[in-house]
Image (cartoon, rainbow, N blue to C red):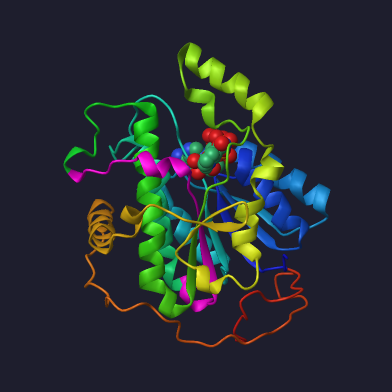
Amino acid sequence: MFALHFRYLSEGASGGLGKSTAYDLAKRGAKVILACRNMKKAEAVARAIRMKTHNDNVYAYYIDLGSLRTVKDFVQDFQKNEPKLDVLINNAAYLGPRATTEDGYERSFGVNYLGHFYLTYLLKDRLKKCAPSRIVNVCSDSYAKGKLEFEDLAMKNYDIYGAYARSKLAIARFTVEAHRCWFPDVVLAYAVHPGCVHTELLRNWPGVFGEVLRAAARFLFKTPEEGCQTIVYCAVAEGIRDQSGKMFENCKPLKTKDFVKDKAKGRQLWNKSLRLCDLDEEPDVSDDEPTPEVNNVKVTGEQDETGAQHLANPEGKKEK
Ligand SMILES: NC(=O)c1ccc[n+]([C@@H]2O[C@H](COP(=O)([O-])OP(=O)(O)OC[C@H]3O[C@@H](n4cnc5c(N)ncnc54)[C@H](OP(=O)(O)O)[C@@H]3O)[C@@H](O)[C@H]2O)c1
């Protein structure tokens, strides 16, 4: 059961799952921000979504998740123009041969994890202010094969799948840790495995194997419209507050490997990420199970000052 939510920020929305997610949310009347690195593509997608959904509240902003500098610039721009943020969808990803980000990090780790971490961290106060709010991290079941060693962030023995899996392990751990840190502020965090979806994700896989994968994807994988359903679900579904911190597949919580929930490893990753992003380290949070500070208060809404339509309020939005 879906209910209409408020303002969404989805990055990596110029194609694939991000685009379908943005379309689905816009169709529900939400205000949707597409944060993308190719502005020509992003503007065209935003325009097409506005036309098809008759929802004028779809905007494109510039971000490159492989450049911490542009993430910071984006956040400054976003915060100047957008007073509210209810759901942040961390979707963008790179899968391909060895490459580095503008900041010099291995590209899969940099784009698929560190950029998202930095973006989320910089937006955390906005999310807390808009609580109950949500973070949806688009992950992958490949996390289970990931190996994260901080001494080898450059990945000496690089392989495409290994680098991708490592980045997905990092974002899966980040989801658990974000839940642990921010659930008391009623910022909920979900990871999503969308399944195998026919998108552009495999475009950079070289050689015959890449061609075989892309051909198989065309016939065997889900469409982006089917594939985005669990992302949309985690963004808008009612009654999943107590599932915060979990990974979802097919709109249901997925049992993840125990090592994803390892608190020491999660904290280590968090602190390492703060250092990599040139942010100050934080004191550890309590080991107790986190509990939210505000109670569910059901409210219904109509139209806010931005024109976004609110039909119902999943998770009981506080009236401000
Ligand atoms: N497709 C699957 O089978 C599958 C399975 C499991 C998980 N996932 C996950 O689903 C998410 C969406 O992937 P997808 O399948 O939709 O792939 P996709 O079609 O390749 O879309 C990826 C999106 O990320 C954007 N992006 C890449 N690098 C970026 C950067 N540095 N800064 C900003 N945006 C950037 C791309 O923009 P450009 O057009 O500018 O490159 C594109 O819009 C990813 O997190 C992926 O890991 C996908």
Residue at the extreme top: 208
Tally of marks = 0
117, above or below 181, in the image: above
Q: Which quarter shows the N terminus?
A: bottom right
In the picture as drawn, the residue positioned furthest to the left comes out as 151
Q: Is residue 62 left or right of residue 285?
A: right
Q: Position of residue 117 (x, y in %)?
A: 38, 55
Quarter occupied by the C terminus: bottom right
Residue at image x 29%, y 39%?
A: 105
Between 144 and 231, the residue placed more toward the observer is 144
Residue 114 seen anywhere in this rendered image of the structure: no
Quarter holding residue 132: bottom right
Q: Does the stretch in magenta take in 140?
A: yes
Q: Based on the displayed image, in which of its 4 quarters is residue 86 positioned?
A: bottom right
Asked if residue 73 lies left or right of residue 239, the reply is: left
Query: Above or below — where is 86 with respect to 102?
Result: below
Task: Left or right? Give the position of 243 relative to 28.
Answer: left
Q: Residue at x 54, y 76 (%)?
A: 130
Residue 86 seen in the figure? yes
Identity of the residue drawn at 40% across and 73% down:
182
Looking at the image, which residue is at 72% across and 53% down? 24
Kindly indicate the quadrant of the structure image that contains residue 85.
Answer: bottom right
Residue 127: give x, y in percent of width and height.
49, 71
Q: Is residue 228 left or right of residue 158?
A: right
State whether residue 305 is above or below residue 7.
below
Residue 171 location in percent, x, y? 40, 51
The reply to whether the magenta stretch includes residue 135 is: yes
Q: In this view of the protein, which residue sits in the foreground, 80 or 312?
A: 312
The residue closer to the viewer here, 93 or 305, is 93
State the extent of the magenta-drawn residues as a range.
Answer: 126-150
- Give the percent coordinates (x, y) of residue 225: 71, 43
Task: Determine whether 115 is above or below 267 in the image.
Answer: above
